[in-house]
Image (cartoon, coloured by chain):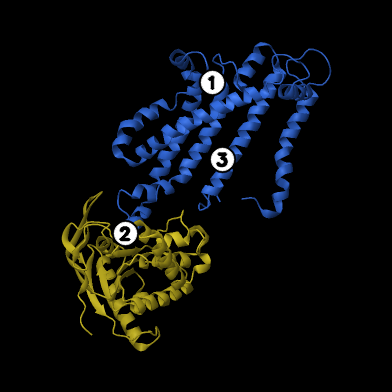
Amino acid sequence: MTPLPDAIRVQAVTKRYAGPGGEVVALRDAQLSVAGGEFVCLIGASGCGKSTLLRIIAGFEAASEGRVEVRERRVDGPGPDRGMVFQDYGLFPWLTVRRNIGFGPASRGKGRAEVAATTERFLQMIGLSAFADAYPHQLSGGMKQRVAIARVLANDARVVLMDEPFGALDAMTRERLQDELLALWASTGLTVVFVTHAIEEAIFLADRVVVMSPGPGQILRDVPIPLARPRDVSSPEFNALRRELSALLGSNHARVAR
Amino acid sequence: MTPPRLTRLQLPLAMALPLLALAGWWASTRGSGYRLIPAPGEVGWALWDLGVGGINDDAFSGMLLTHLLASASRVYGAFLLAAAVALPLGLLIGRVWLARALLDPVLQVLRPVPVTAWLPLSMIVFGLGPRSAFFLVALGAFYPILVNTVFGVRSVEPRLFEAAAMLGTTPAAMFTRVVLPASLPGIFTGLRLGLGLSWVVIVVGEMTGVETGLGAMIMDARQLSRTEIVIAGMVTIGAVGYLSDQAVLRLGRRVLRWSPQHA
């Protein structure tokens, strides 16, 4: 296999906020490269800057220092090349499932027939054809998140940024969506950056787990996950990784507490 | 929400208090002799005479439709004028910082001034007549539409702007693709309150030397001590205002099918 160029390059990114008690460093000197087609999880306790980093890559927030490139173009704002999936879905409540999925192509001026064809394809992919004309408030959390993912894919996003997307779902729905996401990823060659605070989720999904630590937020370790998929969450290798990551996150908690 | 098994009770319950009040009214005005309040029966006949005539054959007979149409045309005309000004202004104030800084303080100070307080000034500026009534109704409808539109625009979830931006919506298209649809529930609430208030203000508006209209009819009847016609006018305004509100409500349910608060 030929090595793909880096899809995402984060170079020396620092983010400062003006907080009520003076300046807060949310993220310090973050370095990260994600190869095209790679699945990377960012994990860490709250305040470690994982969501900040994701939002900077998305272009919702500007870095105070450093630069971010996505597919060799500098990020200076949100754009359709980087699709974002939010924990709270962010679906447009006034649009049906069908129109939500077609929102991106339609706002980018695609023709009616093309939008309809794309929408239909992704409706089938997420198995929600029967709910095409339902409104978001009529859907379950899992269905809403499927629509949010389809909406991003229908818009030709090659990089998908996911901010604790399954955090609000029950355990069974969460597991099913993890499987579906991996299947989508495997069949489409997407690049995924996935923020989570669940260790098992990170090991189950990712090629690499990037461990972050708070106060100030920074990248602590980059742990490759060499396990073959589908992964067995009860295998000894899985458990060894789980222990390793727990220790990394736990020792960090101890350091913060001191 | 109404529990399903209680749905059948809704109509009888809604009718209970009015029927009780009617009975009390009837009981207290029974018998002969001089009294200031007419009996329900007299009001009923007055309504009939107003509607089709043939009982008293005086200046009021058969005039109800004329008065009603005059009032309704002013109510809807002034309401549409108010909406035509308040909607764009509200969208602007809600969305543009400069417009908010410039206009919001003035409007907040003007808003508590009751429409009735504008009556003398309005008579000076617009003269005695329908134009003054039109102005007062428009003014009454203006503020609820404006305030609720501003609120609707201001309360659009920031997340939706992020979602639209990452899907490729340009800042210029943000207004039509996100702001407008997301603030529809607020706008709709404003329109509904505004139209309701228009029916309230019309009576005051038509007290300024207007020939026709339900307000004018009530004022004429008051001066002639025809209290049964005053009450008949009140009943008419109540019924028409209710029907008008129901029409708007139905329209809103269709347009806002997507909103769990309206569906």
Chain name for mark 3? B
Is residue B221 found left or right of B74 in the rendered image? Answer: right
Q: Amino acid at mark 1?
A: Gly
Q: The N terminus of chain A appears in which quarter of the rendering?
A: bottom left
Q: Mark 2 — residue?
A: B166
Q: Which chain: blue?
A: B
Q: Which mark is residue B205?
A: 1
Chain name for mark 1? B
Q: Disc 2, disc 3: CB below 8 Å?
A: no
**Disc with the residue nearer the chain's start (1 vs 2):** 2
- Mark 1 Cα-neighbour bin, 10 Å: few <14, some 14–19, many ≥20: many
Which residue in the rendered view is the most extreme toward the right?
B31
Q: The C terminus of chain A appears in which quarter of the rendering?
A: bottom left
Residue B86 against residue A176 in the figure, above or below: above
Real-space CA distance between mark 3 and mark 1, rounded to the nearest whole angstrom: 23 Å
**Disc with the residue nearer the chain's start (3 vs 1):** 1
**Residue A91: where, in percent of width, then height?**
42, 58
Q: Amino acid at mark 3?
A: Val
Residue B149 against residue A54 in the figure, above or below: above
**Disc with the residue nearer the chain's start (2 vs 3):** 2
Real-space CA distance between mark 2 and mark 3, rounded to the nearest whole angstrom: 36 Å
Pick whichever, A143 or A197, lies toward us. Answer: A143
**Residue A53: where, in percent of width, then height?**
25, 63
Chain name for mark 2? B
Q: Which mark is residue B248?
A: 3
Residue A258 appears in view: no
Pick whichever, B138 or A162, lies toward us. Answer: B138
Real-space CA distance between mark 1 and mark 2, rounded to the nearest whole angstrom: 51 Å
Q: Which residue is depicted at the point 50% across and 58% down?
A: A135
Q: Which mark is residue B263?
A: none
Image colour assigned to chain A: yellow
